[in-house]
Image (spheres, helix red, strand yellow):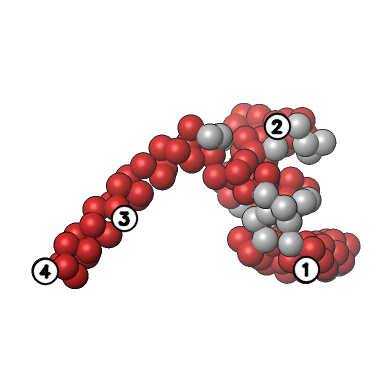
Amino acid sequence: MFYRNLAIFFLIFTLVFIVTLPNTVIAQGGLQQQQLDLPRDPALEKEAKHNLEVAKFYLKQKAYKAVNDRLLEIIYTYPRFSRLDEVLFMVADSFIKLDNPDEAAKFYQQLVNDFPESKFTKESKKKLESLITIK
C-alpha cells in the first residue's frame, strides 16, 4: 500500500511539473533566453568554434552543403554557443546558396527573434524582406 501511494504521489507530481513547466518557461522569456543566461562550458565552446572555422573553410571552397552540415551541427549540438547569431546568419546564407529560401527564412527569423541586438539582425531583416517579396 505504501509503495502504491508513493507511486501515485510521484505520478501526480510529475504531471503537475510537466503541465506547469512550459508556462513558466514562456513567462520567463523562453527557453532560448534562459539557456543564454547560464555559464558556458569552455570545452564545448572550443568545439563549436572549431566547427565554425571548418565551416568558414568550406565556405571559401564554395562547398555549401558541407558548410550547412557543420553549421547545423553547431546549432543542434551547441545551442548555447557564444556566436550562435553568426552561425544562424551563415546557415541561412548557405541555404540561399543551396536554393532553399524557405529554410533560409526560418533561420533568419530565428536570428531576428532570439538575437535582436546582434550585428547580424539588421541584415537578416533585409534578407527576410527580400525573400518575402520574391514569393
Query: Dividing the picture into quarters, in which one does residue 110 lie?
Result: top right
Q: x, y percentage for residue 56?
A: 85, 61
Relative image position of residue 54 (x, y in whole percent):
83, 68
Give the residue pinned by disc 4: 1
Disc 2/disc 1 C-alpha distance (Å): 27 Å
Residue 112 placement, left or right of 29: right
Query: Residue flagged by tag 1: what amino acid is it?
Result: Ala
Quadrant for residue 69, please give it.
Answer: bottom right
Q: Earlier in the sequence, mark 2 or mark 1?
A: 1
The amino acid at mark 3 is Thr
Q: Considering only order in the chain, which callout, 4 or 3, is on the residue closer to the N terminus? A: 4
| Picture layout, residue 105 above or below residue 90 | above
Q: Is residue 91 above or below residue 50?
A: above
Graded by Cα atoms within 10 Å as few (under 14), some (14 to 19) or many (20 or more), the crowding at tag 3 reads few
Q: Residue at x 66, y 35 (%)?
A: 112
Asked if marks 4 and 2 touch (Cβ < 8 Å), the reply is no
Q: Secondary structure at mark 1?
A: helix
Q: How far apart are the alpha carbons under marks 3 and 2? A: 35 Å
Residue at image mark 2: 116
> Which x, y percent locates residue 34?
60, 44
Q: For the residues marked 4 and 1, what is the alpha-carbon distance in whole angstroms?
A: 48 Å
- Whether residue 134 is visible, yes or no, is no
Read off the residue under disc 1: 43
Mark 2 closeness class: few <14, some 14–19, many ≥20 residues within 10 Å: few
